[in-house]
């Protein structure tokens, strides 16, 4: 197509309007027109990356193939557009300021006075420009937070400048706003949108398209009012109504000719969207006939976004297998020797996802024990694999004090310990084993049955590993080391191969699952849970 086009997505009025889903949905629509699409999230917080942020406050940390710890919105982008993103796909204020200050200390600026404009804004623009290196026809750039936030100002000024420099014909501004409904007067109100657009105009950005988040369909009258007072074309007011299923969003937005309007405004000549596959996906989602109950046992369950990709990957498997996934969010701190059997007895499968720190660990160990002793399908991810190893070492191999060095530094039998060359005398941020690594699968295992091949690549995020000193005793007691690093040094997966599904993996398969391409391990897990459910009926 030639020169990369840039679409900037901003939000106003309140947070949580679904800018990320809007951006991801538009990415899917443009890709369905044959365009190559990439995406980037600009986050105004001062953390260098989300890697050290509390999941309860921020949600999950998404990991890319090249080892970036990123905002969870990148997960939405990848799931919708089915493109692997990169280190450059998530930029925080912390990273920007870090780079500028580091360059200043190195003398890069030659003794200049360092200012927000031009030094900080230039660094932001450079990051946006690098998206062109992907060869994308269109780059979607979402700005976190809301217009008016003091933290967002440098990013908004940067994209204003960027549009001037790249050419207004190559840039499009989409503003996502709230159109609230007042039950007392039975009417939708456009004034918050008008004020939000006024705020954008005050910083020199005139939105080209306004996406209106609403609980009720927009009337022609209110669309006309928003068009007139916000200075956009009538068909550039796009309705974004709350939907029961996340993956309906692209189809709903396209009913307002969203991608057609975008292509017209950017002068992109592209064929009509081919949405047959996505339409069929939504049909499957709406017409599932079966059901399984999956216990997600974790320590951050009060905020479901802390396990967003895991929950989505479970649902993706359900879409493929015609099954509703009923997730029971179980706080591992509440599981005790006295109650765990009763609390878990109704489940068709148990999944223990990733996490850090010692809180709730004993409850997770009890969950793994229950699954093993009662032949309940078990899926351990990262920490969940380590939990399975600890439980097996204690209760099967007879190593009663088995534990992880992360939770008990003085433990004599650390069946899980630091990776070679690591210690706790290093910073927390960016020092984990991050990104995609290969794994060789042992023949005749559940892993081989699920993947259907002997070598895979999956994304990692961890600092602790299976301790090789315990390989012999655990395998002699029946644990299968079903996946190793190509050099054989690192244990990547463990399982009980004689079970329908009892698997622990050191990596995070949830990051590579797609709604129309469910991950093979999640499919295997849900298939086993479904079999248990049907037998139990």
Image: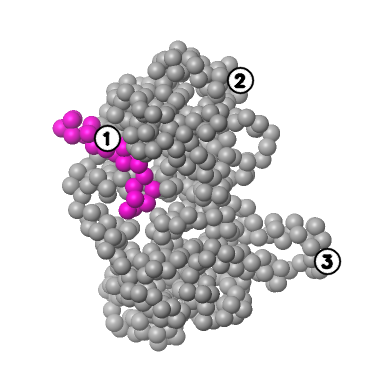
- Report the residue marked by disc 3: 110
Q: Residues within 10 Å of mark 1 (few under 14, many from 20)?
A: many
**Which residues fall within the magenta stretch?**
513-537
Residue at point 53%, 75% (across, down): 3
- Residue 388 got which mark? none
Residue 330 among magenta residues: no
290 up-or-down from 283: above or below: above
- Distance Cα–Cα, label 3 vs label 2: 51 Å
Residue 514 among magenta residues: yes
- Report the residue marked by disc 1: 529
Coordinates of residue 384 in the picture (x, y in percent): 44, 32
Left or right of residue 40, residue 97 in this image: right
Q: Point out the tag, 3 or 2, that comes first from the N-terminus.
A: 3
- Residue 410 got which mark? 2
Residue 389 in view in this figure = yes
Left or right of residue 123, residue 200 in this image: left
- Distance Cα–Cα, label 2 vs label 1: 38 Å
Q: Point out the tag, 2 or 1, that comes first from the N-terminus.
A: 2
Element at label 3: loop
Seen from this angle, which residue lies furthest left?
537
Label 3 or label 2, whichever lies nearer to me, is 3
Residue at point 62%, 53% (across, down): 48
Per the picture, the main secondary structure of the magenta-coloured stretch is: helix
Q: Nearer the viewer, residue 260 or 324?
A: 260
Seen from this angle, which residue lies furthest top?
398
Residue 242 in view in this figure = no
């Amino acid at each position: 197509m030639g020169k990369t086009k840039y679409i900037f997505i901003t939000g106003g009025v309140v947070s949580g309007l679904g800018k990320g889903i809007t951006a991801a949905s538009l990415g899917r629509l443009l890709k369905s027109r044959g365009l190559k699409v990439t995406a980037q999230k600009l986050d105004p917080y001062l953390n260098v990356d989300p890697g050290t942020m509390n999941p309860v406050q921020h949600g999950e940390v998404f990991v890319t193939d090249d080892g970036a710890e990123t905002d969870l919105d990148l997960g939405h982008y990848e799931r919708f557009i089915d493109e692997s993103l990169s280190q450059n796909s998530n930029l925080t204020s912390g990273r920007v300021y870090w780079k500028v200050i580091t360059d200043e200390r190195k003398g890069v600026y030659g003794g200049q006075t360092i200012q927000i404009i031009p030094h900080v804004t230039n660094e932001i623009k450079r990051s946006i420009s690098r998206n062109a290196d992907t060869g994308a026809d269109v780059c979607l750039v979402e700005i976190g937070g809301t217009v008016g936030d003091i933290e967002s100002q440098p990013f908004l000024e940067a994209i204003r400048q960027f549009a001037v420099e790249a050419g207004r014909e190559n840039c499009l501004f989409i503003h996502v706003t709230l159109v609230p409904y007042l039950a007392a007067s039975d009417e939708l109100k456009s004034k918050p949108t008008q004020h939000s657009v006024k705020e954008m105009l005050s910083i020199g950005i005139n939105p080209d398209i306004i996406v209106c988040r609403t609980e009720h369909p927009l009337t022609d009258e209110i669309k006309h009012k928003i068009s007139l007072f916000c200075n956009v074309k009538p068909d550039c007011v796009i309705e974004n109504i709350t939907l029961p299923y996340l993956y309906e969003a692209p189809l709903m937005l396209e009913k307002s000719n969203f991608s057609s309007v975008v292509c017209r405004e950017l002068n992109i000549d592209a064929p009509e969207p081919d949405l047959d596959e996505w339409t069929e996906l939504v049909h499957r989602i709406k017409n599932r006939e079966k059901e399984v109950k999956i216990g997600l046992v974790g320590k951050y369950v009060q905020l479901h976004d802390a396990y967003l990709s895991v929950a989505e990957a479970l649902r993706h498997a359900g879409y493929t297998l015609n099954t509703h996934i009923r997730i029971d969010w179980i706080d591992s701190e509440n599981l005790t020797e006295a109650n765990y059997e009763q609390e878990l007895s109704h489940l068709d499968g148990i999944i223990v996802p990733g996490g850090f720190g010692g809180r709730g660990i004993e409850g997770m160990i009890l969950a793994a024990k229950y699954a093993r002793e009662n032949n309940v399908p078990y899926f351990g991810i990262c920490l969940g694999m380590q939990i399975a190893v600890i439980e097996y070492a204690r209760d099967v191999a007879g190593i009663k004090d088995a534990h992880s060095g992360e939770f008990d530094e003085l433990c004599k039998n650390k069946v899980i310990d630091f990776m070679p060359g690591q210690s706790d005398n290093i910073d927390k941020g960016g020092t984990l084993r991050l990104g995609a690594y290969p794994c060789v699968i042992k023949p005749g295992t559940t892993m081989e049955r699920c993947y259907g091949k002997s070598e895979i690549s999956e994304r990692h995020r961890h600092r602790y590993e299976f301790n090789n000193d315990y390989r012999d005793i655990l395998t002699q007691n029946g644990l299968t080391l079903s996946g190793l690093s190509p050099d054989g040094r690192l244990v990547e997966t463990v399982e009980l191969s004689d079970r329908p599904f009892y698997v622990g993996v050191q990596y995070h398969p949830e990051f590579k699952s797609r709604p129309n391409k469910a991950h093979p391990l999640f499919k295997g897990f849900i298939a086993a849970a479904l079999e248990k459910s049907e037998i139990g009926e």
